[in-house]
Amino acid sequence: MKTLVIGGTGTVGSHTVRELLARKAPVRVLIRSADKASALPGGVEAVVGDLREPASLPAAFAGADAVFLLNALSQDETAQGLAAVAAAQHAGVKRLVYLSVHKVEEGAHIPHFATKIPVEQAVKESGIGWTVLRPNNFYQNDFWFQEAIARHGLYPQPIGQGGVSRVDVRDIAELAAMALTEPGHDGRIYSVVGPDALTGDQVAETYSKYLGRPVRYAGDDLDAWAAQARNFMPDWLVHDLCIMYGHFQKTGLKATEEEIALQTRLLGHAPRKFEDFVAEIAPAWKSS
């Protein structure tokens, strides 16, 4: 059963590719340019195509039994997602797993949450056996902030004090691989979350503990965060993320006990803890 992974060179996608390979599943990864093929693990088939160019998709989807659809944040994310669903339908794909976002309806005022709602709907109406994964904020996003955290003692992601049930992408990848290769997941929506609703202060305290130096939370000032963020990301994305962080600060993004219990049952282990993630990466960060 061949699986086409869209977004297979990114954080979640690359972990999902490894999980599929561990299950001995044939894997194909959609890449936008041929020079990215060398970065893929051995045994992975690379196919060039672009969701912005629908004419390039039939060859990429041909022969795929299952598709993992992960759209990168972009201003045309919905159009790309819909193009992928249409291509999957035309190719006769039997199983489609879509990566959405946790509590997407509650965050419908956040642009990159809102873009996922019509794609979710198209997936559900596609006639393909489908599963939707709705993950929380990733632990691994903190690699973007490594220099600020490890060198300057500052945790800059303004998640507030409302509590965010951040998740390890390895849990997402495990569940994605299960849904792509095992029966019993059609028509299901799974939240993918961490076990603890973390605040900005708690995240900083955890880094302080394992890095052996003070790390403080930079605070909730979104204007200050935006001024810094504009140095390395476009205005549309800064605007989008400011709305998201404002939502985190106001209401949090917290998992329910039921969501955690279901995830634990599906994976056969409790969600990975943030503290364990930090303990794992801290030695390399301290020596960098």
Image (spheres, rainbow, N blue to C red):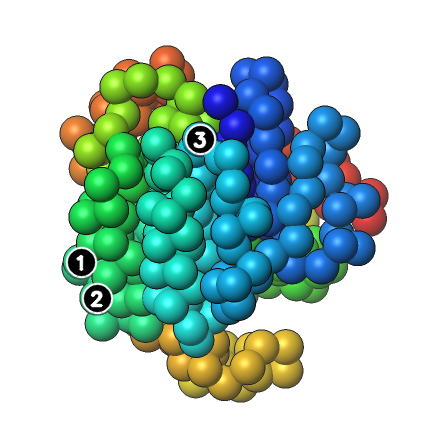
Would you name the residue on which mark 3 appears? 65
Q: Mark 1: which secondary structure? A: loop
Q: Nearer the viewer, residue 282 or 62?
A: 62
Q: CA distance from mark 2 to mark 1?
A: 5 Å
Quickly name the residue at label 2: 108
Residue 145 placed where, x, y %? 62, 59
Residue 268 location (% of width, % of height): 37, 14
Q: Position of residue 22 (x, y in %)?
A: 60, 18
Residue kind at label 2, given as amino acid type: Ala
- Point 31% across, 66% down: residue: 115
Say whether marks 2 and 1 touch (CB < 8 Å): yes
Q: Amino acid at mark 3?
A: Asp
- Is residue 86 visible in the rendered image? The answer is yes
Q: Label 1 neighbourhood size at 10 Å, few (<14), some (14-19), many (20+)?
A: few
Q: Is residue 196 above or below residue 43?
A: below
- Could you say whether the residue bearing mark 3 is in a helix, strand or loop? loop
Q: Is residue 113 above or below residue 46?
A: below
Which mark is nearer the camera, 2 or 3?
3
Circle 2: is it few (<14), some (14-19), or many (20+) Cα within 10 Å?
some
Gap between marks 1 and 3, in whole Å?
Answer: 30 Å
Mark number, residue 105: 1
Q: Amino acid at mark 1?
A: Glu
